[in-house]
Image: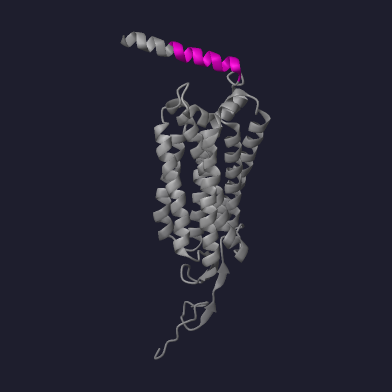
């Protein structure tokens, strides 16, 4: 043709390229397979976390729950439940409220989860490495001072989110170029600087938790493996997130929310639930004493061999 006219952004050319057709509006639907899979996973993990929380509350007077600092365990389980529920804000038709709640809820709730894990790890390190009987640091451990990490870290994240929402908050945006023939409705982050500050704070907090967990790697828990799972997911998430567009980007955000939290739930609480449900004989004071005595006997036999 002698003269061609470019279709507007909300339209696209047909196969014959002789007329413009309207693009269909799309987003991450609950009805599509990807939306169903993510929503089903989030719902299943939410129910599982609530069941674990109920199991811990019901058996709160047993040694295994008390030994795992029941207060911090409850806070961690509640924060994990809200983390899984946060995934539903990313699925379905976006609006102004969900765009704002996506980032603030995710940032604050996950900060509570990571800071709680950090407090649990510091408590373990203080109990087994820093505080032999008779030292003043023992009073710091007994007073529950490591628990103050949770409100301090959460307050910093709330401040960052408040600055973000007050300056350039997220808003509804459209992407007419990622998928041919479709206009994708999505949430624009608003201030990318604030967005990366929130993510950077979460990353630095996770790095500190991983470092402290590495110090506690020989202690009786699995914080080191938990933080390794978390860091691995986030390291792989960042390049894939920046190279994806449209609904795939939203799906990657949901995956980055679900995967690390599922790792936290699996590595920390599943072994405890196994002991409570399937090995009740080990979840008693007598069982703990028998286990301790057997461990001491094994240690003494090993020493005698090397001596």
188 with respect to 213 (left or right): right
Main SS, magenta residues: helix
Name the residue nearer the viewer: 173 or 217: 217
- Above or below residue 21? Residue 105 is above
User: Which region of the structure is painted magenta?
Assistant: 284-297
Q: Is residue 137 visible?
A: yes
Residue displayed at 51% across by 47% down: 153
Number of callouts: 0
In the image, residue 291 lies in the stretch drawn in magenta: yes
Q: Residue furthest left?
A: 307
Q: Position of residue 101 (x, y in %)?
A: 59, 58
Q: Position of residue 154 (x, y in %)?
A: 54, 48
- Above or below residue 64? Residue 185 is below
Residue displayed at 54% across by 43% down: 150
- Above or below residue 40? Residue 102 is below
- Above or below residue 288? Residue 76 is below
In the image, residue 151 lies in the stretch drawn in magenta: no
Q: Is residue 266 visible?
A: no
Q: Choose top left, top right, bottom left or bottom right for residue 147.
A: top right
Residue displayed at 46% across by 81% down: 17
Quadrant in the picture for the C terminus? top left
Name the residue nearer the viewer: 33 or 69: 69
Q: Position of residue 20 (x, y in %)?
A: 51, 81
């Amino acid at each position: 043709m002698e003269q061609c006219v470019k279709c507007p952004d909300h339209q696209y050319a047909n196969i014959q390229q002789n007329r413009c057709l309207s693009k269909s509006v799309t987003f991450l639907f609950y009805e599509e397979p990807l939306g169903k899979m993510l929503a089903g996973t989030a719902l299943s993990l939410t129910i599982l976390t609530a069941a674990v929380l109920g199991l811990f509350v019901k058996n709160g007077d047993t040694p295994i729950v008390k030994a795992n600092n029941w207060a911090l365990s409850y806070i961690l389980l509640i924060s994990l439940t809200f983390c899984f529920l946060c995934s539903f804000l990313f699925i379905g038709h976006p609006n102004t409220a969900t765009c704002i709640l996506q980032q603030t809820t995710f940032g604050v709730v996950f900060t509570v989860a990571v800071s709680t894990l950090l407090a649990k790890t510091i408590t373990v390190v203080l109990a087994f490495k820093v505080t032999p009987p008779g030292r003043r640091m023992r009073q710091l451990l007994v007073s529950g001072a490591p628990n103050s990490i949770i409100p301090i870290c959460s307050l910093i994240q709330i401040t960052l989110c408040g600055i973000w929402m007050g300056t350039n908050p997220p808003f509804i945006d459209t992407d007419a170029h990622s998928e041919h023939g479709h206009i994708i409705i999505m949430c624009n982050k608003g201030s990318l600087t604030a967005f990366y500050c929130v993510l950077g704070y979460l990353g630095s907090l996770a790095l500190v938790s991983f470092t402290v967990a590495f110090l506690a790697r020989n202690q009786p828990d699995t914080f080191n493996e938990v933080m390794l799972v978390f860091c691995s997911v986030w390291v792989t998430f960042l390049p894939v997130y920046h190279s994806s567009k449209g609904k795939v980007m939203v799906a990657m955000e949901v995956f980055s929310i679900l995967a690390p939290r599922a790792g936290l739930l699996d590595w920390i609480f599943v072994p405890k639930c196994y002991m409570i449900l399937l090995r009740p004989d080990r979840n008693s004071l007598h069982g703990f004493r028998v286990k301790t005595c057997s461990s001491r006997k094994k240690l003494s036999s090993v020493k005698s061999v090397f001596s």
